[in-house]
């Protein structure tokens, strides 16, 4: 009986503290914070600048809409370009998820992370182990689910979506490379 | 009084701990210092349509050997979700079965604290095996769900309750933990029995009676390439009429464990499931209610499939075969084992996907058991999910 009361108390307090800790962070800040932490740990830097990359009109025409709507930054530290950061959104079964792709200065993938996954279906794509498949790849690569990207049972739609998103980002980066923007 | 004081002390401690941990965050020395040249560029990513609308359904033609063929709009399910903000979401599935029976299949609120912790309350699916949770027609082979997932795991098995769910991305792990209502000992005059196991006890969340909460849990592991493993557990007493509660055998105790695996690589896919259920008190229960419920039930199936042709644009043709063996009379107390409840089913057929969310299915099934000879059944159907 005492144990049950104690357990109840712990449960209650855990929930309460969880609410307390998290509710003070508004959603956009949460995303931004996650992106910044990712960049910081990827490059082992504590201070950096994010510069938005501008595209001339003729380049814009050959970039997909989703890419133009997303954020693509040059990451600078001590006045030196250390990498690039893409913050985009992809469709899951009935919602959208936010993801980040971090490139090093040579445009090889340094990390891929799902920053926010909103629905129940398909959250498995946030698995670090699954996302590791994209690491170190150059933007010339192309990914096909079931061939060079493993499927996840129960998360087929999101696996296809995330793979398509990465392919799209890679294609766009190739366009920017060809256009001497990067 | 003392315990209240203690609670207040705990709260104060937690509050101070919370404030303490937040201080460095505010000062900013544990976070990277970031300078943006265009601070407004980060999109307002929350401005999405808060309403989720979806549907799935299946229309079937079933032709058992020497019997009438049946044409049936088996299920039409409307999925509705509403996102109140980034953390709070309500999800419901409203189901029409056989065009006349209306059910609520799910209706719960999800409060997202982090990807690892979601609080849930409402009418939820019991995570047991594969099909009960993943039952949309485009996600499984064959016109009908595996027979095991009808007789042993009574899909669609849902209960009202509350609990926790979440993912650990570092571990490739997903978990669910719920406290829920359980089966009714007697449900509108129908008892738990040898043929259907627990199926008749499903209260489906409509004016369901409760006097003993049940517990349901599942862990899914997807950290091995192409493979996904699941371990499910369910335990609890059945719910009985309050006037009978004290009587021995008015309820039975249930322990169910499930193991499932799904593998998929290129055109090849395989899945399997094993379920074991132990039922305590079945003998007294059978005495009271004049039934033939077993003390143990078990079953398993294995299925292999191969995508024979891929026409592009999510159009493909898949062939599959599934072998099932389940016994809802695996072990009995003070009664004679009915061999007809030790069933075997072989199903083989094709699935023609016309897009990501539409599939035409056709298959043939052989059913037999320890007592009766094989009889066949031909099935055709169309399923969709969006």
Image (cartoon, helix red, strand yellow):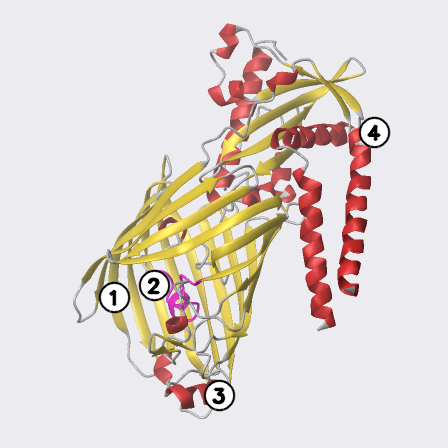
User: Quadrant where the C terminus of chain B lies?
Assistant: top left
Q: Could you tell me which residue is drawn at 67 percent across and 25 percent down?
A: A103
Can you identify the residue that label 1 sits on?
A: B377
User: Which label sits on residue B247?
Assistant: 3
Mark toward the viewer: 2 or 4? 4
Q: Is residue B261 above or below residue A33?
A: below
Q: Earlier in the sequence, mark 4 or mark 1?
A: 4
**Mark 4 vs mark 1, CA separation in Å:** 69 Å
User: Which label sits on residue B270?
Assistant: none
**Quick one: SS at disc 2?**
strand
| Both marks 2 and 4 on one chain | yes
- Point out residue B21 in the picture as x, y percentages from the top left corner: 80, 40
- Point out residue A81 in the picture as x, y percentages from the top left corner: 74, 16
- Which of these two is toward me, A75 or A143? A75
Can you identify the residue that label 4 sits on?
A: B29
Chain identity of mark 3: B
Q: Could you tell me which residue is drawn at 46 percent across and 35 percent down?
A: B50
Q: Which residues are magenta?
A: B145-158
**Quick one: SS at disc 3?**
loop
**Mark 2 vs mark 4, CA separation in Å:** 62 Å
Check if mark 2's residue and mark 3's residue have beta carbons within 8 Å: no
Can you identify the residue that label 2 sits on?
A: B347
Chain identity of mark 2: B
Packing grade of label 3 (10 A; few <14, some 14-19, many >=20) is few
Packing grade of label 4 (10 A; few <14, some 14-19, many >=20) is few
Q: Earlier in the sequence, mark 2 or mark 4?
A: 4
Q: Is residue A132 above or below residue B360?
A: above
Q: Please say whether residue A153 is visible from this viewpoint.
A: no
**Mark 2 vs mark 3, CA separation in Å:** 44 Å
């Amino acid at each position: 009986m005492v144990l049950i009361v104690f357990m109840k108390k712990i449960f209650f307090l855990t929930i309460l503290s969880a609410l307390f800790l998290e509710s003070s962070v508004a959603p956009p800040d949460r995303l931004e914070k996650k992106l910044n932490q990712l960049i910081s740990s990827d490059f082992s830097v504590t201070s950096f600048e994010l510069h938005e990359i501008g595209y001339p009109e003729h380049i814009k025409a050959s970039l997909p809409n989703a890419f133009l709507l997303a954020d693509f930054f040059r990451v600078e530290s001590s006045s030196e370009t250390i990498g690039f950061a893409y913050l985009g959104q992809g469709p899951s079964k009935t919602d959208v998820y936010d993801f980040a792709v971090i490139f090093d200065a040579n445009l090889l993938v340094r990390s891929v992370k799902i920053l926010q996954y909103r629905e129940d279906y398909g959250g498995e794509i946030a698995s670090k182990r699954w996302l590791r498949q994209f690491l170190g790849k150059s933007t010339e690569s192309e990914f096909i689910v079931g061939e060079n990207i493993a499927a996840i049972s129960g998360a087929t739609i999101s696996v296809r979506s995330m793979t398509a998103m990465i392919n799209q980002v890679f294609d766009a980066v190739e366009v920017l490379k060809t256009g001497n923007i990067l | 009084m003392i315990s209240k004081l203690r609670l207040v002390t705990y709260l104060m401690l937690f509050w101070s701990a919370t404030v303490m941990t937040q201080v460095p965050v505010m000062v900013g020395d544990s976070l990277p210092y970031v300078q943006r040249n265009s601070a407004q560029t980060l999109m307002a990513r929350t401005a999405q349509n808060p309403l989720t609308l979806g549907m799935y359904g299946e229309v079937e033609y079933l032709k058992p050997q020497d019997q009438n063929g049946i044409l049936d709009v088996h299920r039409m399910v409307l999925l509705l979700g509403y996102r109140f903000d980034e953390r709070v979401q309500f999800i419901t599935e409203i189901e029409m079965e056989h065009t006349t029976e209306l059910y609520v299949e799910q209706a719960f609120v999800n409060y997202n604290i982090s990807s690892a912790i979601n609080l849930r309350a409402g009418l939820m699916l019991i995570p047991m095996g594969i099909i009960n949770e993943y039952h949309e027609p485009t996600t499984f082979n064959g016109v009908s769900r595996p027979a095991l997932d009808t007789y042993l795991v009574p899909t669609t098995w849902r209960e009202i309750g509350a609990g926790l769910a979440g993912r650990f991305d570092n571990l490739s792990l997903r978990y669910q933990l719920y406290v829920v209502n359980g089966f009714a000992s007697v449900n509108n005059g129908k008892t738990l029995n040898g043929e259907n196991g627990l199926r008749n006890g499903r209260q489906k969340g409509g004016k369901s009676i409760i006097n003993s909460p049940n517990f349901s849990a599942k862990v899914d592991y997807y950290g091995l390439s192409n493979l996904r493993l699941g371990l499910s557990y369910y335990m609890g007493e059945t719910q009985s009429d309050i006037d009978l509660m004290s009587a021995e055998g008015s309820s039975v105790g249930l322990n169910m464990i499930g193991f499932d695996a799904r593998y998929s690589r290129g055109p090849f896919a395989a899945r399997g499931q094993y379920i074991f259920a132990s039922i305590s008190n079945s003998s007294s229960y059978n005495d009271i209610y004049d039934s033939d419920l077993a003390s143990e039930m078990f079953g398993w199936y294995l299925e292999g499939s191969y995508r024979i042709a891929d026409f592009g644009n999510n159009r493909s043709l898949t062939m599959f075969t599934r072998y099932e063996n389940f016994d809802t009379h695996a072990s009995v107390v003070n009664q004679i084992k009915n061999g007809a409840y030790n069933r075997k089913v072989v199903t083989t057929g094709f699935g023609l996907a016309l897009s990501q969310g539409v599939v035409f299915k056709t298959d043939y099934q052989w059913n037999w058991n320890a007592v009766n000879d094989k009889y066949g059944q031909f099935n055709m159907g169309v399923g969709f999910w969006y």
